[in-house]
Image (cartoon, rainbow, N blue to C red):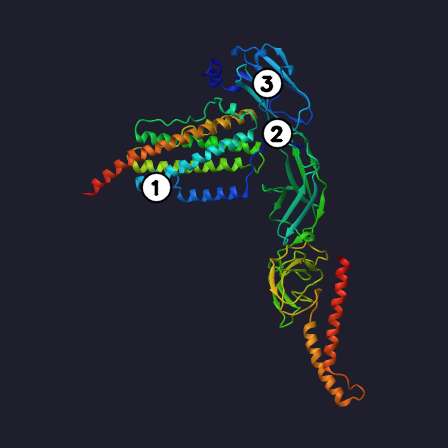
Amino acid sequence: FPSRLSLSLCLLGINKMAGIFPQDPALPIGSTLTATCSVSPDLGLHASSLFWSLNGRRLPSSSYSVLSPTALSVTLPGLPASRQRSGDNLVCHNHGGHVLAGSCLYIGMPPVKPVNLTCWSRNTKDLTCRWAPGGQGETFIKTKYTLKYKLRWYGRERECEEYNAAQPYSCYIPRDLALFTPYEIWVEATNQLGSATSDVITLDILDVVTTDPPSGVSVSRVGDLEDHLSVRWESPPALKDFLFQAKYQIRYRLEDNSDWKVMEDVGNQTSCRLAGLRPGTVYFVQVRCNPVGIFGSRRAGIWSEWSHPTAASTPHSERVLSGSCDSKSGDYNSTLRRELKQFFGWVRNHAYGCGGMSIKLYDQWRVWMQKSHKTRNQVLQGDKS
Amino acid sequence: MSGHVKNMCPQLTISQAARTLLSLLLVAAIDSVSAGVVCRKQPCGSSLQRSLKLTKLIHKESVDLLKTYKLSQGDMSELFCQMSINNVPDPNISGLDPSERMLSIYSHCKAFLPHLKRVTEQQTDLQPPSCSLLSKLSTAHNRTNGLANQINCIYQTLFPNLPIPPEPVDGPTSVPPSQNVFQQKVYGCVVLKRFKAFLSRVTRELRTLKSQVCTRRITFADTNALF
């Protein structure tokens, strides 16, 4: 049944009848806090009849001190970090357990200097920065991170405004970025117990450019060649007109194998032939781009993501796995063979002392080469295991 | 550092976010126009049925909303929720006849809106940004606004000769002035507890209204059709 006390609270509001000091304080972990609950004389309560609770647990009366007939204090030594971001609930009750007043405690740490600040630009249009909180990464109380930037030699300090709730330690600057001039960028971390600033990084947008993966990646067979696949792609559309010296990388793997083989130096071309592949096998291929040479810059940019995997299979036969971006070896072999055949025919008719030379001898030699390749590779694999 | 984060704010998962988005889109699709714009005339039964469905949805979500709220405030939340605070709308629907009761539903919906908004603002400062409480509060606000608009339209359709329900007189002054954190926690709990109780009453009321008012309307319309 509502007591006279509850009715009073109802009419006048809880803050007028009782109060706690300090109200909602922020304190470092390990602090000792003495809080005081003061009640209005109109309530007709004596301080000795009150009790305290913290996060739902009643505090021992040995920690209380009656300061006056209407004021009871409690001392909390060595406070641990706050259990929830909204603060620990320190509550003053009357003898019946009714809530008279409350104060939310924020126990935590001042921020540690943020670290590992890195930024990148997508196609020179924007800038995304990411950092990590310093120390163990947790302050237990609400800590605000602000990314700030300014042009190195002039211009005012600006703040990044687009923070991502899903990625707490990053920020996005969508537009109005200058090129060919360095920026200074840093992160400030602030909470109720203090603040900390990261090291300043200096960068030119053009030095940290990444782009989209190459588009239109296609993988196809090279005629009947059982150990070749041809890969073609287009330069990323957003930077197509600016990528004077772009670099590409290709990686490929067998369908049932998770180990990628990377061809690191594909250069500026937009096609490549993979050779020395296993016949009758499905391969997955991906390509990525580094926007080197954008706007004449000499510096390498940041590699794009790999393109979506494209699959193709080699025709059936037997070969050994090796890898190189061999431009025309297949064509070379069949052309060579044809020429050799013609040559040997001519030799038989015109040269004396080389009568035993024939295309059959050449074929036998090739078979011998394959066998010795296999043996050599088996030995290598044996060494690896 | 271990064992500290006991009563963490429930985090929004991707599937929850997707469900919320889907629900919002669904409600937006069936939501009627806002007060002050001409409402499309709809059959009495189906309008009230839609509002009843919406009310049930908001009520169901308000149960989870209150639970999430309590989890985010830390221990001792139940006692807070039992305290009395001035100016928070009471959950009871008043009025003797259907028009008065419908008007009461409308004005109560409108009255809860600034309080829901205030709780959302306060909890935005108190909780981490990924806290699911914040999106649930926002959803409750939007849906309740939609429900108020629907009730407004139904009222205008059913009682065209009665004055259009006015905007509530208690504007921004109805929400309490700045409060300390503890008071905010108490306030939020009281608002959401009363909100939940209100929605439960609205569900019952709309069922009753549907049977009372729409049956009468059908009879009247049939009579009209004879001429």
Judge if badges 1 and 2 mark residues of a common chain. Answer: no
* Viewer can see residue B62: yes
- Looking at the rendered image, the disc whose residue lies closer to the viewer, 1 or 2, is 2
Q: Nearer the viewer, residue A234 or A306?
A: A306
Q: Nearer the viewer, residue B111 or B199?
A: B199
Q: Amino acid at mark 3?
A: Trp
Q: Are marks 1 and 3 in contact (CB under 8 Å)?
A: no
Residue on which disc 1 sits: B39
Residue plotted at (54% across, 24% down): B183
Residue on which disc 3 sits: A52
Where residue A197 appears, as percent x and y from the top left, is 70, 37
Residue A249 location, quadrant? bottom right
Where residue B46 appears, as percent x and y from the top left, is 33, 41
Quarter of the image that includes the N terminus of chain A: top left
Residue on which disc 2 sits: A83
**Chain assignment, label 3:** A
How far is mark 1 from mark 2, CA to CA?
Answer: 50 Å
